[in-house]
């Protein structure tokens, strides 16, 4: 942990904010509102944020995140969801005129341990995240079905699905390096599919398959001026869903944040993301073809650091994203309210004796 004293005497701890570390953990439970199979991906854009690559204070920390998302999608996602939940019989094709709407309210809890001993010159940490919450998803519209002999039929669907329960588990290992105002990181995370999931249900809290995600990032942070900019690029490999025999393609995601510390405690700025599926979906259960998904998002952020006694500090962060340019994926808006409790940053003590006249 490096602390830097500014010209005004304010002390900034490099990485004392765990914004990026917290965001990187949020990899699971809003899946029914998100893309690839049926418009659903492992990675929720916006996981990473400002100060993503800055080292943090060694020791244990705890994080709570309230996450709300409200999204909608048109015919392409509605058609994919009908195939996924078994709404279209095998050997039938479907033309769909329908919409999907979803709203999720989730609470993420994460425990992180940051090691004091460097690994390859980097600060290493391990975290485990779980989630509990509710997801409500609806699909409404008409389907024109064509059978293998050319027989046709039309059907109207109005499906409402709500699930309350636990999401999957997400472990994460991170390594961070600091060189002055430059900070670098690499991470690996993944999905352990133990959450509430049923391939025949419209709303879920788990994704039903294993996944692994890895990437790297950079943060520029000058404690003397309070300027900060971060970006993290990652890729997700999805294993096949054993319930549907559907495998999502490789996903690419870029999360970024820029901020200004107005004081040593108050932070304001912007956040954004780009999510793009770069591989094609596949598997014997894939009835919609390549189905590559994409979405972009941007929004404001506000952060506040405060001491809790002599040895701990708290951090609140509020950020929100408005989404646009979506393809084969629900889009709308999402809000993240984060509280983190971590060991306080301690200014370095000089080993030089102090002389006075």
Image: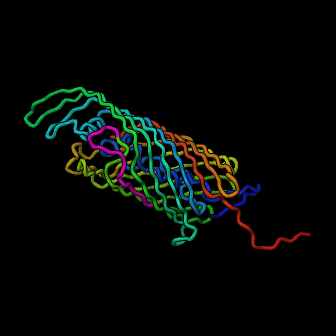
Task: Read off the magenta span.
Answer: 186-203
For residue 93, side relative to residue 227 (left or right) = left
Residue most extreme to the front: 165
Q: Total marks drawn? A: 0
Residue drawn at (21%, 32%) of the image: 95
- Can residue 326 be seen in the rendering of this structure? no
Residue 111 or residue 223, whichever sits in front: 111
Q: Quadrant of residue 237?
A: bottom left
Q: Main secondary structure of the magenta part?
A: loop
Q: Quadrant of residue 121?
A: bottom right
For residue 197, side relative to residue 289 (left or right) = right
Residue 300 or residue 172, whichever sits in front: 172
Could you tell me which quadrant the C terminus lies in? bottom right
Residue 53 or residue 63, whichever sits in front: 63
Residue drawn at (19%, 29%) of the image: 144
Indicate the position of residue 113 as horizontal and vertical percent values: 53, 61
For residue 266, side relative to residue 284 (left or right) = right
Image height of 62 relative to 348, above or below? above
Residue 309 colored in magenta in the image? no
Image height of 119 relative to 317, above or below? below
Indicate the position of residue 174 as horizontal and vertical percent values: 49, 62
Residue most extreme to the right: 357
Indicate the position of residue 244 as horizontal and vertical percent values: 24, 47
Indicate the position of residue 186 as horizontal and vertical percent values: 48, 62
- The scheme the figure's colours follow is rainbow
Image height of 214 relative to 33, above or below? below
Could you tell me which quadrant the N terminus lies in? bottom right
- Can residue 166 be seen in the rendering of this structure? yes
Residue 197 colored in magenta in the image? yes
């Amino acid at each position: 942990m490096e602390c830097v004293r500014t010209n005004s005497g304010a002390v900034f701890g490099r990485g004392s904010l765990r914004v990026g570390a917290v965001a990187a953990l949020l990899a699971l439970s809003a899946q029914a509102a998100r893309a690839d199979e049926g418009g659903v991906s492992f990675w929720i854009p916006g996981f990473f944020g400002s100060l993503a690559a800055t080292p943090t204070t060694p020791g244990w920390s705890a994080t709570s995140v309230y996450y709300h998302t409200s999204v909608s999608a048109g015919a392409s996602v509605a058609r994919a969801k009908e195939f996924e939940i078994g709404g279209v019989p095998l050997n039938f094709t479907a033309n769909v005129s329908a919409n999907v709407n979803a709203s999720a309210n989730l609470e993420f809890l994460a425990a992180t341990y940051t090691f004091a001993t460097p690994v390859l010159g980097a600060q290493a940490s391990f975290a485990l995240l779980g989630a509990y919450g509710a997801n409500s998803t609806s699909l409404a519209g008409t389907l024109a079905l064509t059978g293998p002999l050319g027989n046709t039929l039309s059907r109207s669907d109005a499906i409402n699905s709500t699930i309350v329960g636990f999401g999957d588990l997400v472990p994460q290992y991170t390594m961070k390096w600091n060189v002055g105002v430059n900070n670098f990181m690499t991470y690996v995370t993944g999905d352990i599919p133990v959450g509430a999931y049923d391939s025949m249900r419209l709303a879920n809290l788990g994704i039903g398959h294993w996944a692994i995600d890895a990437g790297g990032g950079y943060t520029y942070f000058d404690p003397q001026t309070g300027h900060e900019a971060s970006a993290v690029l990652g890729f997700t490999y999805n294993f096949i869903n054993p319930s549907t025999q559907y495998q999502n393609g490789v996903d690419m995601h870029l999360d970024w944040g820029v901020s200004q510390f107005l004081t040593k405690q108050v932070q304001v700025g912007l956040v954004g993301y780009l999510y793009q599926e770069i591989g094609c979906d596949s598997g014997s259960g894939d009835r919609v073809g390549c189905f590559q998904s994409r979405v972009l998002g941007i929004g404001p952020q506000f952060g506040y650091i405060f001491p809790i006694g002599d040895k701990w500090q708290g951090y609140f962060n509020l950020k929100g994203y408005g989404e646009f340019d979506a393809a084969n994926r629900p889009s709308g808006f999402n809000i993240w309210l984060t509280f983190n409790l971590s060991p306080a940053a301690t200014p370095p003590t000089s080993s030089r004796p102090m002389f006075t006249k």
